[in-house]
């Protein structure tokens, strides 16, 4: 299988930075057609094992690493739920995805995973193997708001992520009463992703003097309470 990695930049920015860059992006980029009013809500359930393998690899800066999550949007798990695997290699990243039903997602959360072995989706079978062999389990809920923009040349995607919240000890992320709280003093994250080249018009639009590329992780931030 041909694995295609994308370039990824992340910057921690201020609210003033957001206002300035947002105005530039609106002049040169398209809003994501899936956004409602320019934004959408994301809820993810991240997996890790008892030794916090995914968290430790992130904090230690391991060059080759991966993490699994289940994700849905705008508080509506009846619409679209995906199992995703993010793989990182240095400053490059790629993502694999497979659809889940609400029932399947709930069964995974509840530890009822035998059915995954016979799934037609290879990613679901892979998670099953790693839940059995590596001890991966649902670990932390991550909620946040995203403002996405797209630019077709270079397949560029720019997003602002903010209002990052954590579910503390709750991992039943389909429950509407699963309370989340602010994940400490989490910053606003500007993220830029592209394929082979980043057009200069976008490079100029996202410039933030004094801000450096960061390795910020929403999952790691949401582990602040354990």
Image (cartoon, helix red, strand yellow):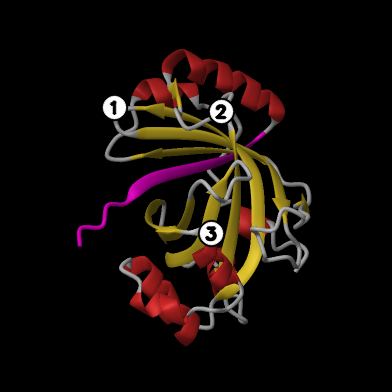
Circle 2 or circle 3, nearest the eye: 3
How many neighbours does mark 3 have within 10 angstroms: few (below 14), some (14-19), or many (20 or more)?
A: some
185 or 102: which is nearer to us?
Answer: 102
SS for callout 2: loop
What residue occupies the far left of the structure in this picture? 1
Quadrant housing the C terminus: bottom right
7 or 177: which is nearer to us?
Answer: 177
54 or 14: which is nearer to us?
Answer: 54
SS for callout 1: loop
Quadrant housing the N terminus: bottom left
Q: Distance between the residues labelled 1 and 2?
A: 23 Å
- Disc number for residue 218: none
> In this rendering, is residue 76 above or below 98?
above
Give the extent of the magenta segment: 1-13
Q: Residue at x 69, y 24 (%)?
A: 16
Q: From the top left corner, tell me how far across and down residue 192 is, in percent.
A: 46, 37
Q: From the top left corner, tell me how far across and down residue 194 is, in percent.
A: 36, 38
Q: Does the magenta stretch include residue 81?
A: no
What residue occupies the far top of the structure in this picture? 27
- Disc number for residue 153: 1
Q: How far apart are marks 1 and 3 (CA)?
A: 36 Å
Q: Distance between the residues labelled 2 and 3?
A: 22 Å
- Disc number for residue 36: 2
Give the residue pinned by disc 3: 102
Circle 1 or circle 2, nearest the eye: 2
> In this rendering, is residue 168 above or below 4?
below
Q: Can see residue 89? A: no
- Give the left or right position of residue 131, taking residue 197 as reference: right
Q: Earlier in the sequence, mark 2 or mark 3?
A: 2
Q: From the top left corner, tell me how far across and down residue 40 is, in percent.
A: 58, 35
Q: Which of marks 1 and 3 is nearer the N terminus?
A: 3
């Amino acid at each position: 299988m041909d694995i295609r990695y994308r370039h990824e930049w992340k910057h921690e920015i201020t609210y003033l930075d957001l206002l300035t860059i947002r105005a530039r992006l609106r002049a040169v980029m398209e809003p994501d057609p899936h956004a409602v009013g320019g934004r959408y809500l994301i809820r993810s359930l991240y997996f890790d094992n008892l030794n916090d393998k995914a968290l430790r690899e992130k904090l230690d800066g391991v060059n080759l690493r991966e993490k699994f999550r289940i994700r849905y949007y705008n508080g509506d798990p009846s619409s679209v739920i995906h199992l995703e695997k993010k793989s990182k290699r240095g400053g490059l990243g790629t993502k694999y995805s497979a659809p889940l039903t609400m029932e399947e997602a709930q069964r995974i959360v509840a530890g009822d995973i035998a059915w995954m072995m016979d799934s037609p989706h290879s990613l679901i079978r892979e998670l099953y193997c790693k839940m059995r062999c590596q001890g991966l389990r649902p670990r932390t809920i991550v909620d946040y708001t995203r403002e996405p923009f797209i630019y077709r040349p270079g397949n560029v995607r720019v997003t602002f992520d903010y209002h990052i919240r954590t579910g503390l000890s709750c991992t039943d992320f389909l429950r509407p009463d699963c309370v989340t709280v602010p994940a400490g003093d989490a910053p606003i994250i500007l993220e830029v992703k592209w394929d082979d080249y980043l057009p200069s018009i976008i490079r100029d639009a996202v410039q933030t003097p004094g801000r450096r590329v960061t390795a910020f992780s929403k999952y790691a931030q949401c582990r602040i309470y354990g």
